[in-house]
Image: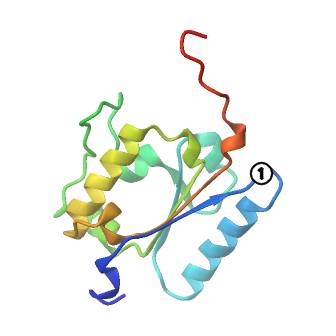
Amino acid sequence: MSNQENQHSRLFFRDKPAGSGKTFICNYLITETISRDFKSVTAAWTDIAATLLTNIATLHSLFKLPVPMMNKSTCNVTPNSIHGHFLRQVSLFLLDETSMIPKHALNAIDRLLKDVSNNNFPFGGKVILFGGDFKQNLPVVKRG
């Protein structure tokens, strides 16, 4: 990817109901990126969701997220570290079960990828495919 191509964000969200082939599509994209020598990384919020996909990690392990997550939490990765270099080389991030990810975690990942990529666009201008099914989440009722 040239520097100019990476100057704007490419964020996508795939919202499909259970049984519609989300896992199949994700595994297909992983296989395609490997066959074309692109670095892709797949991660999910929970370990259970991670077991269904190929070469996957949890978001905590991939981005070194702190526990507990707070508003201004940061990932434990520096741009000059080996892990920072690895994240900079990734062309495609496939993040599954996105509807479960707290906003503080997404904000920390956004700040990390901006820092690692030295790019101020959302998520450092990386191509990110969010996936999930918002119909699987229960409604939140205040004081319910």
Color style of the picture: rainbow
The residue positioned 56% from the left and 57% from the top of the image is 56
Residue occupying the point 49% across, 86% down: 37
Q: Is residue 121 left or right of residue 97?
A: left
Q: Quadrant of residue 103?
A: top left
Name the residue beneath numbered marker 1.
Answer: 17
18 left or right, relative to 99: right
Residue 101 at x, y percent in the picture: 50, 41
Tag 1: amino acid: Pro
Quadrant for the C terminus in the image: top right
Residue at the top extreme, as displayed: 143
Rendered location of residue 65, percent (x, y): 35, 42
Where in the figure is residue 125, as x and y percent of width and height? 33, 71
Q: In which quarter of the image is the N terminus?
A: bottom left
Q: Residue at x 62, y 81 (%)?
A: 32
Count of labels in the image? 1
Label 1: how many Cα within 10 Å (few below 14, some 14–19, many 20+): few
Q: Write down the quadrant of residue 15 in the picture.
A: bottom right
